[in-house]
Amino acid sequence: MIGQEILWTRKISSIVHVRKKQQKHNKRKEREVRIAEIKIRNFRKFKEVAIDLRDKTTVFIGANNSGKTSALVAIRYFLNQDDNQKIKIYDFTLSNHAKIKEIGRKLENETQDTAVKRDISLWNDILPSLDLWLDVGDDDIHYVSHILPTLDWEGGSLGVRLQYEPKDISNLYSEYKEARSRSEELKSKVQSKDASDLFQKDMLDFLEQNLQKHFTVKFYGLDPAKKDAKQESIGEPIEGNPLIGLIRIDEINAQRGLDDVVSAKPQTRLTQQFKKYYNAHIDSAEAPAEEDVEALEAIHRAQKIFTATMQQGFKPALDGISNLGYPGFYNPTITINPQLKPTDGLDHDSALQYKLDGCKDSFLPEDYNGLGFQNLIFIAFKLIQFRDAWLKFGKQKTTLPSGTNIEYPPIHLVLVEEPEAHLHPQVQQVFIKQAHNILTSRPEIKNGKLTTQLVITTHSSHVIHECEFADLRYFKRVQPADGEVQSSNVVDLSNVFGDDEKTEKFVTRYIKLTHCDLFFADAAILIEGDAERILLPHFIRKWNYLNQSYISLLSIGGSHAHRLKPLMETLEIPTLIITDLDAVETDGKSAHVMCGANQKTNNHTLKSWFPKKESIDDLLGLQSNDKTQDEPFALRVAYPKTITCKDKEVLPYTFEDSLIFENKEIIDAAKDATGMLKKAQNIGDALSAFKKIRKSDFKKAEFALDLLCFSNFDDVKEPSYISDGLQWLENILQSGSALKCC
């Protein structure tokens, strides 16, 4: 044992020497030890996903049921030792359940020639696991000395696998066979068919009842040199939990309980959180220091005065009781000896108060402030509690084990699920901007080179608005293959645009300013302008499945929509592009649409994204199937097409003239038409429509608003090219391609 310690000491000294030499030559920037990546396997929706964590804040986003919460649960279950035993058989990826049953069948049917090996080889591709990859700084090797993979390790990346596996495979197999034998024996004695469901049918059924007995989390070191290999090799299990003293994990889940100040449970009130903080960090009765003596003396004096007053006040009543007597017993004497505690001052409704500007010496109790503000204070104070418990601030310093070499775990991982619950939009933005600052506002963190990493899940576009794209991790629902169930993948949005900085700046600014809801949508519709934005929601209501889905409308013209291509290909959500033909003549001037006139489109989306056609004749000649794509994601483009109006064919240029021609009869017949609706009456052909709509006095947004006020508005139908596009999107969502289920 002593020889092994000497070997490790030499090993660490050698590594430190190498690292200092590298730093001298490469001028490598010093940094704190941190979690660089988490890889989750075979857990719920995740067959295998890797999630890079940022130095400060990482935000998990995505549509409903995309796996954000599952990722948080996996981190909690594996990294928090107290939660290991909460893993259930249904946390195993659902598509692996058939393989678990097959293992059971092999055991039941094994013979001498087909004996099942008593090792975990059959479980290798089934077991839930979490790989934790650390980035270790130059001065932080002492934190990880017990998990260094080889003597050749030169620093940087270091990995540990946490795998949920059988404690003793032989014992598991033996007990399973015994349980199945008993079940079959009992089953043969019972005549009722319904009773057959009462007995354990297979390995899955057995583990549902016995998982905690037979499975546990084991730890393995990972070799960074083989990190990118298809089959990462792991060695022998590491004894004990190597993460103790290395990572502290805290969590605020979505069900915080602070949903109504009247019915809130006592432990969820802000006052009780302050009381808990006092007991942990401030209470002067716990190991009092010199500066606490004065306060303790004051409490002691108050105790004596209060006790004397209470005894005097209760004396007449107690004298009456003392005369009652009780046969067979000595008469007990009752006295009053109240105990005063500092926290007694926090056990009433007005202990926590709010001071309002402009109201000198006037205060309101905790219950009198808005729920949104109370929740913000509640979450912020929980973060303060996490931080100070991690640093063992105040009186908690006395609880540090004697002789410990590491005062604090160097990594503090804080998980917050859906902070927007009960928070108003403005308050959500305040939270995301200040949360990490709150967690790191003590000087011990910077001085000790400690790391705080905050992981947040959210459905809030207001939260995303305050985040950098590099902080976002998009959880994407993946179309299942045959025989599989729905799974999820994770995309690092900082890598979407590659080296195209110009496009990245445009898209990130556009999305953050207008359409953060895109990251939570079941589908997206890209539209041209204000008229479509006003009227399209009305058209969507006519489609049953679309109306039930979360559709993100992105108002972006055809000259810019193509810039979204890298992002949409990354998100892979079904997308309908509704755009204009934007016809131009050979001299580059805009013109009304004509066939056989050698016109081209000036629409960059049609030219460079899809369908990558420039000729107007080619675009008008495309069939419906030519306007759709399946890979890399479901996409359809919709633009004006030929309309038969009063036995005459017209070729619209934009959404507005398409709408006018397809509703010409009711628009022309409107006797109460005013504004833009009146200007739209009695347009005879594509040329006159083109000229009138392009005039500066024709306001497209006003035209849409005038239609909303139109007495026959319910009879207005969407242009047929839009109807075709909406029908396609309805079919895509209804068929399950958008992965709304599971």
Image (cartoon, helix red, strand yellow):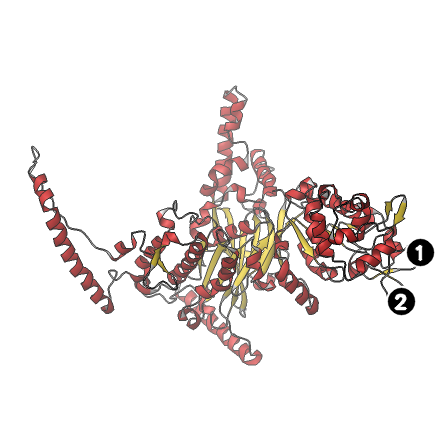
**Distance between the Cα atoms at labels 1 and 2?**
16 Å
Query: How many residues crowd around disc 1 within 10 Å: few (fewer than 14), some, or many (20 or more)?
Result: few
- Which residue position is annotated with label 1? 596
Name which residue lies at 69% across and 46% down. Answer: 538
- What is the three-letter code of the residue carrying label 2? Asp
Q: In the picture, residue 691 is in which quadrant?
A: bottom right
Q: Position of residue 467 (x, y in %)?
A: 56, 62
- 620 lies left or right of 222: right
- 511 lies left or right of 181: right
Circle 1 SS class:
loop
Q: Position of residue 459 (x, y in %)?
A: 56, 52
Is residue 691 visible in the rendered image? The answer is yes
Q: Position of residue 445 (x, y in %)?
A: 42, 69
Among numbered discs 1 and 2, the one appearing first in the sequence: 2
Q: Position of residue 180 (x, y in %)?
A: 51, 31
Circle 2 SS class:
loop
- Which residue position is annotated with label 2? 587
- 571 lies left or right of 285: right
Name the quarter where the N terminus is drawn. bottom left
Along the line of sight, the residue nearer the viewer: 469 or 77: 469
- What is the three-letter code of the residue carrying label 1? Gly
Q: Is residue 496 above or below residue 177?
A: below
